[in-house]
Amino acid sequence: MTTSVDIVIEICGSAGEGTISAGEVMTRFMSSKGYEIVSFDSFPSEIRGFGKCVAHFRASTETVLAPGKYTDVLIALNDAHAITQLSGLRKNGVLIYDSKPPVCHEEDRSIAGWAEPGMTAYGIPMLELANKAAGNAKGRNMVAIGAVACLFGIAPEEMTAFIERRFKGKKPKIIESNIDSFLLGYEWTKTHVSKEDPYTFKGAEIVPPEGEKTIMNGNEAVAMAAMDSGLRLYAGYPITPATKIMEILSKRLGESGGVMIQTEDEISAAGNVVGAGFSGKRAMTATSGPGFALMGEMINLAVMAEVPAVIVNSQRGGPSTGLPTKMEQSDLSAAVNGGTGDSPRVVFAPRDVVDCYAITCLAFYIAEKYQTPVVILLDFYLSNSIRNIDKPVPPDAEMCSSNVFPADEALDDYERFKITESGISPRTLPGMPFGMFVDTGLEHNTYGKPVYDGENHLVMTEKRYRKFHTMQAELPPAVETGTEGEVEIGILSWGSSSGAAEEAVRKAQEKGQRIASFHCSVIYPLPEEALKAFSRRCRILVVAELNYTGQYANLIAPVLNREVRRLTLITGLPMASEDILEFIGTFKG
Amino acid sequence: MTTSVDIVIEICGSAGEGTISAGEVMTRFMSSKGYEIVSFDSFPSEIRGFGKCVAHFRASTETVLAPGKYTDVLIALNDAHAITQLSGLRKNGVLIYDSKPPVCHEEDRSIAGWAEPGMTAYGIPMLELANKAAGNAKGRNMVAIGAVACLFGIAPEEMTAFIERRFKGKKPKIIESNIDSFLLGYEWTKTHVSKEDPYTFKGAEIVPPEGEKTIMNGNEAVAMAAMDSGLRLYAGYPITPATKIMEILSKRLGESGGVMIQTEDEISAAGNVVGAGFSGKRAMTATSGPGFALMGEMINLAVMAEVPAVIVNSQRGGPSTGLPTKMEQSDLSAAVNGGTGDSPRVVFAPRDVVDCYAITCLAFYIAEKYQTPVVILLDFYLSNSIRNIDKPVPPDAEMCSSNVFPADEALDDYERFKITESGISPRTLPGMPFGMFVDTGLEHNTYGKPVYDGENHLVMTEKRYRKFHTMQAELPPAVETGTEGEVEIGILSWGSSSGAAEEAVRKAQEKGQRIASFHCSVIYPLPEEALKAFSRRCRILVVAELNYTGQYANLIAPVLNREVRRLTLITGLPMASEDILEFIGTFKG
Amino acid sequence: MTYISDALVKVRGEGFLDYRTRELPTWCPGCGYFGIAHALLQVVGDLGLKNEEMCVVSGIGCAGRFPIFMKVYGFHTLHGRSVPIASGVKLASPELTVFAVGGDGDILGIGGGHLPHIARKNIDVTLFLFDNSIYGLTKGQSSPTTPLEQATGSHPRGNPDTPLNPVALALSYGASFVARGFAGDVEGMKSIMHQAITHKGFSFLHLVSPCVTFDKENYTWKRLSESVMPLPHTHVPGDHDAALRLARDERLMTGLFYQDTVRPSYIDHLEAQRQSV
Amino acid sequence: MTYISDALVKVRGEGFLDYRTRELPTWCPGCGYFGIAHALLQVVGDLGLKNEEMCVVSGIGCAGRFPIFMKVYGFHTLHGRSVPIASGVKLASPELTVFAVGGDGDILGIGGGHLPHIARKNIDVTLFLFDNSIYGLTKGQSSPTTPLEQATGSHPRGNPDTPLNPVALALSYGASFVARGFAGDVEGMKSIMHQAITHKGFSFLHLVSPCVTFDKENYTWKRLSESVMPLPHTHVPGDHDAALRLARDERLMTGLFYQDTVRPSYIDHLEAQRQSV
Ligand SMILES: Cc1ncc(C[n+]2csc(CCOP(=O)(O)OP(=O)(O)O)c2C)c(N)n1
Ligand SMILES: Cc1ncc(C[n+]2csc(CCOP(=O)(O)OP(=O)(O)O)c2C)c(N)n1
Ligand code: SF4
Ligand code: SF4
Ligand SMILES: [Mg+2]
Ligand SMILES: [Mg+2]
């Protein structure tokens, strides 16, 4: 008998207990088996200090689009922290805890005492077993995985084989003690625990991975897409959650003759990118809120001087240094409207790891062809969330070189900023023997010469905005799911929250609701027509996003000119379909 | 016979010809006589280079709220530049030009040939007379003023007395040659020109200045208000049009024991202000677009750490370095929505020079009491526009110290960021023996300790926004003028454009239109109730502002949820009532 | 909210909490920063400074977390901006004793543009540069002081950027007080900290410290302990040329490189200008 | 669009417009920048550089306007950012000859945080610092090189900030080529410009120039002409210590202070690392 399975597992410990790495082993293993996986980690921003770590993942035989809001299985490596996660555990969920934990808790601080009656609690002597396997507490996380494997029907030999592959290159002793810990956990559970809960992966109807698959997170997808798009310069400054993009490219960009430079700050990083873009080469930087705030003036320059630049902002909790390791979607206003002056820039927000790749390729194409900065809004969740995806198809030659060059005869009286219907002016690059010009962040005439009269300013401003109209034709369309035609409720969301919205719509539709979702990976230019059309067919509009003020709702207000209901969450977690279902559940007929 | 007069005069020359200083002499003189004056200068951003300079002013016996769009009298010091100003001269306007100009123009390049038939053109040998008076061309501007005085009935002895006062302290030779040039211009005109136009100041019904008057521009008003509000630190970096604020304070702040520091950049300027604010002292910086773009991260810090800071942004044409010496209102979005994260800050936009003083005093009060950054949006016009105003009343003691300190008993378990109904937490300052705490740009709990859980983040975010709700009660209300009750057209405007809107409404009303204007010097928090109430009584809503995208219209869209018509101008000039009247003139029944 | 147990307070004895909050550090066991903190807390005690009259302004990084442990008015600000913010505190409230604290990335990387100017203006702030030659908090990328060719998170093939010399820079900027300490030498640090805090004008303290978690190559306890040496006894802190020469020496010397006891601080300078008008 | 008349072109003779656009300068008559521009345009001609293979990146200021006059690919960018933008051009397009141009405010004030890093990375850009010791374009405020006590627009009572020494800084940052020229000495400038442009790696040119409009006190033609003197003939450009000593001398010396001909440029360094893997 095969069956469909959808289980949410959470491992919770304190910094230094291997929580996140246990999560990674589990998700990558399940993924390699063909499960659909959505994972989400959460950890403190301090290097040490006993902060709470949570590795959360959902493994399903069906397509899953968002992490689960409620947990089926909670694995407690640290009782004090895990107690705070209990409220998310389903009433009939499973708790796996260390029956002999490393710190001797007072009675009322053991998590077992906090589990509610309907829950099943399994105590495993993780510390003891880890000590037995390797002489220290380090293997507790692997003991826990052993218990999970045993309880939920994962073949131990498959897991040990995976561990061997995964840790290849590490010292044999380390690999060995990991495997030993795992096996001890497995065996102990097998002999001492009698399963009482209904959850299992056994007999799961796994769709065997078709075609070539690859496991990656959003940061990896962006880095890979940039390389595939012909990146010549990456300039960056470390900042969570974007640092990994730099570290990946630092390893790999050199192989293709590109350069990765770690700059002294984010202004310089953005400056290097603009310089490279001016010289006609593809370049990128990646940062997060505080760094993005520093790049504003440079982005404005790229707008005015019409220089391509790709800037990734992986959003985290704000404002200011804020919550460096928490999820939030609150840099939307800053990305779209943060520029001084009338300063249009393209803003994309990919919805998932696959989209991270596609949108990054598109960003390079659009930046170059339309001579404009492009901001890609990732977020903490997307940057770190691991998915098993089809090996992405690299961009073709046209995508990889989208420069618009002037015709030879135009070079006689060459106007670098020529007024055109499309708004795109033909562009020359340093090194080309004709077509020299001086670019500037001052307002300028069609030749690039600084000019301050009002007529010229208007014409040039119109031209700069016209490009955004022109590009609409080749930008990805909005995606609507759910009921067609007139609906009761329409849910608008953006970026990584749109998976939850689609999932919520699917579930609500199954219950007979007339409901639809709307999502567009293109934030600016706004898909005005699509927004209006969607709005027309919805009685109630909900805008669901992860910030306090409803930044997307504000952004589209001048287009919609109607009341919307705002679902705004700032919990530090990605959005789940349950969040949306619960919100619309409160609506009165 | 006395009569009401309203004349717009423009002097146009090239850089280095004394255009702007001639304008200043005239405006200050007329102002001292009791005329209502609105002036506006426009000049190139280069030090040299023959760029066009225009000194534009309107002198009236009535209250005037905006510069005139059309010119009555155009004085050409440079024909090539002045020709481009002819389109703004009234069909029956007056042209005064140099009949023997310093550069020998070809026939068709003399401005006299371009004047339209209805115009009156007076040729004055300015160069010749200047040479006669002082042996060089420098006095051409004073010769022109002499001609103006003679043609329009200004008593020469009053003007020479004024020049003597104005140039007091300069070398006697300079004063003398200025006066000689003026008098030669006056006399020559008297003997050689027969007046043919209808314009005159003679018999003007001047309201003699009541009470103590003082002539100042917006920059001076801001600087004076800051001093009167107890400024202890001004930190700044030069940038047009804000530099003068620094230069004024550099002279005067020291006298009161305050410090003016010229920093290495705008980040440091804002940082110094935040440091001073943290220590409990009033501090300010002033900048323009490019510098403001650099301050974003620091403003976010002040939001999160709840530190008072006053930041003046005198807007100029953008984006990027843009049009440094042109008028524009295009930093509104950046000021309100430019922060990464949910980052609320107060944004004020004074409407005129008087308001510059009042709003600056209010800014210090609000910043301190509500522990928040306050952005004051000036603009190029307001910064430089000279008005003769009632001597402003300095803020009282309460306005000058609005700190909220904790009660003694609260110091036992002192929560610096205590959750309160008002959102304002009691605050201690360095030096106070109890109540030490560590402030931070990280999200924190009520004690200031960094904490990353979602519940706390929500509560603190709510608290930070709640302050903005609380302060509404003591912010200046919106001002509506024009027809009461239901109207055909309602005009919303902001900042220095609102004078033009009020004037337009007055004129349209005189013609029998049902029309009203709405203005609020408080941009954020949005005056939601007032906006809604105004919207309800207007059939058509117009939002008039000086940027391309309609930034204020976008900002209020989520409040209004209705269509508005956007009057968006980016001519580099301040708004005139004619701009609005012409716009609404195009509406169909 | 109290994390250091009463038991530990007893062991450490009377006065342990005079300048220390009960917050547990977020630093790794063995981190050199403990030594720096230890020295500083003792020095302010020796100087008898009042807690509330000190203001400690820090940037972001492991070093930036320092104010959390100190019982003063603290401000944990932005990455790279402790210098301008501390300047603002001092200029507006000259009665306070103001410290600026930051890591090598903080002070010499993103904040490197501010350092020349606080030095040449001689604003009376004491700057504690916690130099572990790595970006600690972001987990081990190259910093402006990372030795050439060291493998780091951002440069797995080896750091290609020649490191800066913080003491030489501070001297070139015209800082009126420049000294170096080593996290393993608490007494040495105490001595220069004492002098720095009492110095009128800007003081620059370069404090070399191992990051035990992300640097196993160069700035380790072992290698630093072996290589650090005191300045020659003959060195006179008034001799700027000698100070610069010694700062540029291959060997890592500790102690007071330079002090100008005559030059007025920024505020005193303004005051003198005011008087003379 | 053409502003320089054919008549003038005839007077100046053949080749005058080889590297010069016909734009009229926005500089004041008598400004020292004319001398610098003159020298540079001649040097690139002497070197036979192709116009289109040069990229001139400038900041904002009177100095920043320089690219407008030169027939190359120019980029007039942001105040203080010529250095990072020029770096990006060079790293992405190493085949170009890249110049960065800026004033003293541009390079040492708002942009001062970038200078140490382009120097220590040794990115192959030639930096022309047009130092008039004043903020020209914003009409005469103090700059990081304004002499102490000079009265300026922002400091009418006298500048209270000790000026920075650009040559000493560049040396301390580890720049591999450091020289100084004087706007009144075209031949001297030509010689160091020639060497700087052909140098592999970062080169720093400190070009002292009067602002005739806003500085009547110190950096005037008269005072500079009197005080500027060439470096001693005995000076060897490989001697870093001597270079630093001479840079710190009271007297304003011109010529090549330092050159390291061995150190690889940033890109060459990366290439070597790549090869060695
Ligand atoms: C504007 C900005 N950019 C980047 C970061 C991320 N960040 C935090 S700490 C840090 C560097 C820490 O290194 P260092 O200053 O040497 O301090 P350490 O942790 O080594 O003590 C970085 C890059 C940030 N918080 N803000
Ligand atoms: C971010 C920013 N801040 C300030 C300015 C205003 N500004 C333009 S040029 C300049 C200084 C010019 O001085 P310097 O760099 O020495 O060049 P110079 O004009 O003397 O050649 C300033 C402050 C600006 N354009 N951008
Ligand atoms: S990461 Fe390094 S610097 Fe940071 S606390 Fe740990 S040892 Fe110290
Ligand atoms: S203001 Fe000074 S630097 Fe600028 S062009 Fe004039 S003389 Fe030269
Ligand atoms: Mg460090
Ligand atoms: Mg200068």
Image (cartoon, coloured by chain):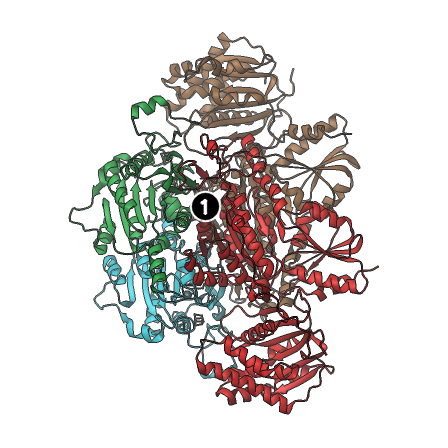
Chain colours: A red, B brown, C cyan, D green
Residue nearer the viewer, A17 or B329 = A17
Residue nearer the viewer, C11 or A33 = A33
Residue A529 quadrant: top right
| CB of mark 1 near ligand 2 (< 8 Å) | no
Residue B393 placement, left or right of B528:
left
Residue B561 lies, in percent from the top left, at 74, 46
* Secondary structure at numbered mark 1: loop
Residue B390 lies, in percent from the top left, at 59, 35
Tell me the amino acid under the disc marked 1.
Gly
Task: Determine whether C88 is above or below C232 in the image.
Answer: above
Residue A452 lies, in percent from the top left, at 50, 32
Residue A493 quadrant: bottom right
Quarter, ligand 6: top left
Which quadrant, please, contains the N terminus of chain B? top right
Estimate how packed mark 1 is, as few (under 14), some (14 to 19) or many (20 or more) residues with alpha carbons within 10 Å.
many
Residue reaching furthest bottom?
A: A191
Q: Which residue is mark 1?
A: A280
Residue reaching furthest left?
A: D234
How many marks overall?
1
Which quadrant, please, contains the C terminus of chain B? top right
Residue B526 placement, left or right of B403:
right
Task: Determine whether C230 is above or below A407 in the image.
Answer: below
> In this rendering, does residue A64 appear at all?
yes
Residue A578 quadrant: bottom right
Residue nearer the viewer, D142 or B247 = D142
Task: Determine whether B11 is above or below C49 in the image.
Answer: above
Task: Determine whether A236 is above or below B71 in the image.
Answer: below
Residue B35 lies, in percent from the top left, at 59, 25
| Residue at mark 1: chain | A
